[in-house]
Every structure is written in C-alpha cells, then in structure tokens.
Amino acid sequence: MKYYIKTFGCQMNVHESEKLAGMLESLNYTKTDKINDASIIVFNTCCIRDGVEQKILGNIGQIKKIKKANKDLIVAICGCMAQADGRSELIYKKFPFVDIIFGTHNIHLFKEFIINFKRNHKKISDIWKEANGIYENIEISRDNLYSNAWVNINFGCNNFCSYCIVPYVRGRERSRNYQEIVNEVEALVKQGYKYITLLGQNVNSYGNDFEDKSINFSFLLKKICEIKGDFKIKFMTSHPKDLSEDVIKTIASNDKICKVIHLPIQSGSNKILRLMNRKYTKEHYLTLIDLIRKYIPDAYISTDIIVGFPGETEEDFMETYNLVNQVKYDGVFAFMFSKRSGTVAEKMENQIDEETKKTRIHKLLELTKSITKQKNENSIGKTFNVIAIEKSEKGFLTMSDSGKTIIVNDELEINKFYNVEITKFAYNKLFGKLVN
Ligand code: SAH
Ligand code: SF4
Ligand code: F3S
C-alpha cells in the first residue's frame, strides 16, 4: 500500500501534508513519488489565486485515467480549495472518481475517512463550516528537507485583507499553547533538526487570543531560544501592523534566531493599502525597515507585493516600484491581483485589466532582478553562516539562513553549520570558502 501526496500552496500546507503522511503511515501506507504506483492519491490544495485553482483542477482531471487503470485506487482532495465556498460541490460533480473530500478544519479526521471508506466504499464529503480548535498530537512524517522542521504557532487569520481568501478557508486566529510549542521544538532539536521554522499567517499576533497578555511572540521566541542545542529559528509571516520594536530587538539579540524577516508590504501606495485593509501606512512600514536595519544591519528582508489591485493607477504602481527600489529587498514575491469570491475586493470598482497587470509585474520583476544581481555582487567578501546540505560535482552545496545556495570547495560534513566567505559570483551562482 503506497501513498502519493501532491501539495499546493504555502508552507502551512507543506506542513499539513506531513501530518497527512503521518496518518497514512500509521495505517501502514508507505510513500511513493510515482503517482501511478499509488494505492491512495491525496491532493492538498490551495486557492490563494485563481491560477492555482485552475492548475489544481487540471491536475485532478489527470487522475481519471489512473483510476481507470486501477479501480481500487483511493482519491482524496483536501486543503484550502476544498474548504472554499462551493468548491467541494464542484469537485464532486466534475470529478466523479474522487472518493474523499475534506477541508482544512477537519484534517485530523483523515485516518477515520480512509478507514470508513475502505469499510463501506461510500463517497465522503465532509467540509466543516467552522474551525473549532487546535488538534495536538496528530501523527506526523516530516520531510526533513535541509534539516528543517515546521512548527505551527498560530492557525487562521483575523485580518481580512480585502483581497484575501485565507480568513475564509482557515478560520479565526487560534494560538497554540506555548508550552506545547516549546515541547515540540525541544523534541525536534533532540532528533537533530537544525532549523525550526515557526508558522503562522501572522506570527506577530501570536497570543492575542490569550488572557495572559505577557505571552506574545517575543516571549515565545525567548522561550525557544532557551532550549539547549545546535539549532536555529526562523518564522513566517510577519505583518507590518503587528511587528513590534520588542520583537525586532529579540531577533537582534539572540544568536539562535535567523536574521531573516519576510515583511509583506503588498503596495507602496497609502490609498491602495487602505483599500486592501492592511491597517498600516507606507510611512509606518518604512519606520519598521529603519528599525530592523538599526538593530540588525545585516538582516535579510523580503516582501510580497500585489500589482493591479482594483483602483491602482500608474502613480500608485510607481509608488510601489519606488519603494522597492528604496528598500532594496533581498527577495520580492510579486503577484497579479486575482479576484477571490466572497472577498471585499471582488466587488470593488475599477478592476485592472490583465494586460496592465502583466506590464506592471514585468517592470517590477526587472527591477528586483537587477537589485538581486547587485546584492549578489556586493556579497563578495562577506561571511555567511551556512549549513552543508549535499555534495555535488561542483563541490559542497551549502545554504545560508535565507535559503541562498553557496558552493564551497572545502571538505564539509552534511548538516553542520559553517562560516563561509563569498569569493565569487558567476553564472548566477555564489561560491565561497570556509573561514574560522
Ligand atoms: N499571511 C501572509 C500571506 C498569505 S498569502 C501575509 O499576510 O502576508 C501570500 C501572499 O499571496 C500574500 O502576501 C499576497 O501578496 C498574495 N495574495 C493573497 N491574496 C491574493 C490575491 N487575491 N491576488 C493576488 N495575490 C494574493
Ligand atoms: Fe491574508 Fe491578510 Fe491574513 Fe495574510 S494577513 S492571510 S494577506 S488576510
Ligand atoms: Fe496557504 Fe494557499 Fe491556503 S497560500 S493558507 S494553502 S489558500
């Protein structure tokens, strides 16, 4: 009995797929990377933009012929898209070969769904209207990619950015008990994980739902830093409206915390930020960037941007463009606005045509490409702490805290941290040498 899981979307989903895998393995399934060899196929879906949904629908369609060749195959669809309004009905109708559909709020029941389906071969479609809690102790089979382990700190989102479907498919914000988190991290460090990445739609609002207001993100970071061992902490995503000076100072003053901050701006125009319901201004955002650079001069800062939000004029777009040029981000993830049903922005006037969106995103990507190239060239002579991940023909592949690959020609031990000085940037690749 083999399982094949395909994951779409963000790290939250990548981590949840590890839980799906854990549940499958506890039912004696083993993993396969070949979809045709599977006795159960699971698609863990995303619906953040329409393009993703269309791709997923296309991919589900391709399962039809596999099911034809293997009548005993079980097909399960879950995740954010399955959770979104009307989608489970659509999948059910369009793809009669799908056996099990469930949403994001009841993934802990996956095992029961499989057992029940195997017992009576009746289709299962179970989408909960509301997320009603936090489920601890779900079995898990971690991917262990680059020695990283994902750890949930809060689920859901309360922000309702006007373009975003996440609050509708992930429910209200719920923070995990901090002792549970600390215990999980402690166990992972003992198992040898070198990176612990804390996950939440907005990590900075961790604990907002607790009565005890002293338990917040900064408190949690400090508690995790007290854990003994050779490991580092990452986290995502930070929301500019909630990132505090206190958190920035905590990041600055703890060696265990990676100096990597993903801080989505979305737009550089205050008018658009207001329409997006982001609850901060460009000026506030830039103050945060200054604070980060004051306390953590070598911080790696990345961002998300949406171009072509309803009402975005050429001037609004240029404000975003100029802000990107001013901040000189280390990484930019740019997206064209996509209408999501049920969101406020879906019904907004002055929707932007696709051509304009494409022109704007290309212009922005050209800029970010040149900034990245410049940054890579400027990194020559600088030292990075890296982890050795693999031996290749060219030398050892290592990875910096921010995920940059650096090729090193010295003898290294896999999964160990080293300090490496950049010696060369060529063919879009960074090369370095070991320093003490
Ligand atoms: N919780 C995170 C991000 C979640 S979604 C945060 O608040 O930053 C990841 C990114 O997808 C967002 O930052 C946004 O840039 C993009 N995104 C979300 N909804 C979108 C939409 N309807 N159209 C285009 N991009 C979108
Ligand atoms: Fe979506 Fe905004 Fe919540 Fe991020 S903070 S998940 S963009 S609603
Ligand atoms: Fe993530 Fe996509 Fe859901 S981005 S939270 S998997 S809608």
Image (cartoon, helix red, strand yellow):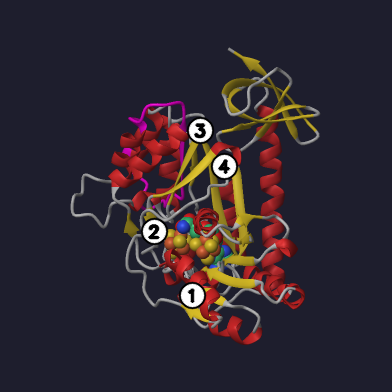
Q: Mark 4 touching mark 2, by CB under 8 A?
A: no
- Whether pointer 1 and pointer 3 mark residues with C-beta atoms closer than 8 Å, the reply is no
Q: Which residue is mark 1?
A: 116
Q: Nearer the viewer, residue 389 or 356?
A: 389
Query: Which circle's residue, 3 or 2, is located before the other in the chain?
Result: 2
Tell which circle, 4 or 2, labels the residue nearer the N-terminal end: 4
- Which of the marked residues, 2 or 1, is nearer the chain's N terminus? 1
What amino acid is found at the position of numbered circle 2 in the picture? Phe
Counting from the top left corner in percent of width and height, residue 398 is at 65, 30
Q: Which residue was labeled with disc 3?
A: 194
Q: Is residue 310 left or right of residue 290?
A: right
Magenta stretch bounds = 225-246
Q: Which amino acid lies under the numbered mark 3 shown in the image of this protein?
A: Lys
Q: CA distance from mark 3 to mark 2?
A: 24 Å
- In three-dimensional space, the C-alpha distance between marks 1 and 3, rounded to whole angstroms, equals 38 Å
Numbered tag placed on residue 155 in the rendering: 2
Task: For the N terminus, give its image quadrant.
Answer: bottom right
Looking at the rendered structure, the kind of residue marked 1 is: Asn
293 with respect to 305 (left or right): left
Extreme residue in the front direction: 119
Which of the marked residues, 4 or 1, is nearer the chain's N terminus? 1
Distance CA(mark 4)–CA(mark 1): 31 Å
Q: Report, in whole angstroms, how far the alpha carbon at label 4 lies from the one at label 3.
A: 10 Å
Q: Which residue is mark 4?
A: 144
Characterize the local packing of mark 3: few (<14), some (14-19) or many (20 or more) Cα atoms within 10 angstroms. Answer: many
Q: Can residue 281 be seen from the camera position used here?
A: yes
| C-alpha gap between disc 2 and disc 1 | 28 Å
Q: Earlier in the sequence, mark 4 or mark 3?
A: 4
Quadrant of the image occupied by residue 352: bottom right
